Amino acid sequence: MDRLPMVERRAQLIQAALAVASRDGIEAATVRAIAAEAGVSLGVVHYCFEDKNELLREVGEAIAVQRVDRVDLPLIPDPDARTVIGAALATVWEAMRERRGAQLLSFELTTAALRNPELRGVATAQLERNLLAARELLDEAAAAAVVRWTVPTTLLARLTVATLDGIALAWLVDNDTPAADQALSALTDHLTTQTKR
Amino acid sequence: MDRLPMVERRAQLIQAALAVASRDGIEAATVRAIAAEAGVSLGVVHYCFEDKNELLREVGEAIAVQRVDRVDLPLIPDPDARTVIGAALATVWEAMRERRGAQLLSFELTTAALRNPELRGVATAQLERNLLAARELLDEAAAAAVVRWTVPTTLLARLTVATLDGIALAWLVDNDTPAADQALSALTDHLTTQTKR
DNA sequence: GTCTATAGTTGGATAGAC
DNA sequence: GTCTATCCAACTATAGAC
C-alpha cells in the first residue's frame, strides 16, 4: 500500500470515505476517520486533496457512478405495459433498498450540498443524473412494451425520481417494506395510464 | 429578558434553535450559535436542557407543530373530485414552499435522526404525523367532493407524503417550480382516478 | 437563576523530520 | 512520499463566583 501514485491514492481514499460515510453517516466521515479507514496517516489525505470539500465532491461522484452502473431491464416474454413498467421500477427500487447506508448517505449529501456552496454541484449533478437515468429507463420500458408515452418523459421522469426518493425516505424511517411496495405499485399504475399504443 | 421561568426560557431557546437551524442548517445550530441567537450565555442552554439532543428533539416537535397548524381546505362552489384534491394538495405544497429553510431543516433532522439513536424518535414521529395529516386531508377532500376512495387511505396517504417529499427535495435542489407544479398535478390526476361516487 | 471561566474533546489543516 | 508532532479553532459540557 506504500508509495502509490496519487491517482490511485485518491481513488483509495474516496472509497474509504464512501465506506465510512455510508456506514456511520456523513458527520462521522471526518478526515481523521477516513484516513484511519484507509490505513494511512492524517497528512496523506491533505496531501491528496485540497480540502475536505474536494474529497466530499469526489464521494458524490463515486456514489452516483456506483448507482448508475446498470439498470438492466429484465426481458419479459409477453410484454404488456404494466408488467414492463413494474419490472423496471422494481429493479431500481431493489438497488436502492439493497444498500441502506448508501441511500441514506445520498440524502445526507444532498442536504449538505444545499447548505454548503462548495458542495452545491453535488446536489445538482446527482439530481440531473437521476432524472436522465429515469428518462432513459422510461424510454426503454416503453420500447419494450411497444407503447408510447402520452406526456413528455422529462415530466414523468421527475415524478418517478421524486416518488422513488420519497418512498425510500419513508422506508428508511419506518422500515415498512410492504407499504413501500404498495406505494411503488401505485406509481406503476399511474405511469401505465400515461401510455398508448 | 432576564429571570424567565424555565418553561418560557426553554420555549425561547427552542425558537432560537429553530431559527438558526432553518437559516443556516442543522450543522450550524451549535449550542453556542443558539445561545447567541437567543441572546443568552452559553451556560443557560445547558441549564435548561439535559444536552444538545434534548434540545434537538424539541426542535423536531416545534417544526411539526408549526406545520400541522392548519390545512384549511378552501371552500369550492362546484366541487368535482379533481378540483378539490388539487386544491388540497396545492395548499400543502404552498405551505412547504413558503419556508424553504424549514423544509430543508426537516430533511436534515430526518437524516440526523436516522444516524443518531437519541434522535430516532424525531424521524418516526415526523413521519407518523405527516401520514396522519395526509390521511385526514384525503378524507376531508373526499367528503367535500362527495366521493369515496377505492383504496385504503393509509396507502394513499403514504404515496402522497412520499411524492410530496420527493417533489420538495428536487425543488430544493434545482428550484424548478413549474416542474414541481407539473409533478404535483400528476399526483392529483392519479389520486382522482382512485375515487368513485 | 445567571454569568464567567474553563475543562476536555475533536475537528481541519500544516510544518518539518525522515 | 510519508509520518510525527503540533497548531488553532470550535465544539459540548461543567464548576464555581455572583
Image (spheres, coloured by chain):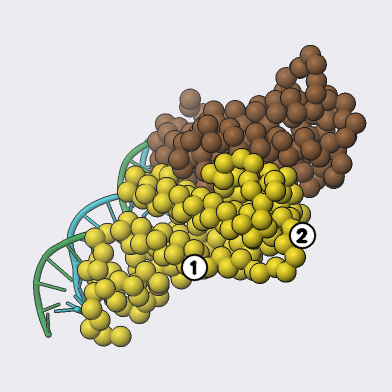
Chain colours: A brown, B yellow, C cyan, D green
Dot 1 surroundings within 10 Å: few (below 14), some, or many (20 or more)?
A: few
Dot 2 surroundings within 10 Å: few (below 14), some, or many (20 or more)?
A: few
Q: Does residue B93 appear to the left or right of A45 in the view shown? A: right
Q: Residue B178 — which label?
A: 2
Label 1 vs label 2: CA separation?
A: 27 Å
The answer to which of A18 and A31 lies nearer the viewer is: A18
Judged by depth in the image, the label closer to the viewer, 1 or 2, is 1
Name the outermost residue toward the top: A77
Rendered-image quadrant of the C terminus of chain A = top right
User: Is any atom of residue A173 visible in this view?
Assistant: yes
Q: Residue B69 — which label?
A: 1
Residue B8 position (above or below residue B25): below
Could you say which quadrant of the image residue B8 lies in? bottom left
Q: Are marks 1 and 2 in contact (CB under 8 Å)?
A: no
Secondary structure, mark 2, is: helix
Place of residue A139 in the rendered image (x, y in percent of width and height, measured from the top left): 82, 33
Secondary structure, mark 1, is: loop
Residue A40 position (above or below residue A128): above
Place of residue A189 in the rendered image (x, y in percent of width and height, measured from the top left): 71, 35
Instruction: Report whether mark 1 lies on the same chain as mark 2.
Output: yes
The answer to which of A44 and A19 lies nearer the viewer is: A19
Question: What amino acid type is highlighted by mark number 2?
Answer: Pro
Residue B80 position (above or below residue A159): below
Place of residue A156 in the rendered image (x, y in percent of width and height, measured from the top left): 77, 43
First reached walking from the N terminus: tag 1 or tag 2: 1
- Give the letter of the chain under mark 2: B
The answer to which of A166 and A135 lies nearer the viewer is: A166
- Give the letter of the chain under mark 1: B
Who's the residue at 24% across and 74% down the image? Answer: B6
Place of residue B64 in the rendered image (x, y in percent of width and height, measured from the top left): 45, 61
Question: What amino acid type is highlighted by mark number 1?
Answer: Asp
Who's the residue at 63% across and 46% down the image? Answer: B149
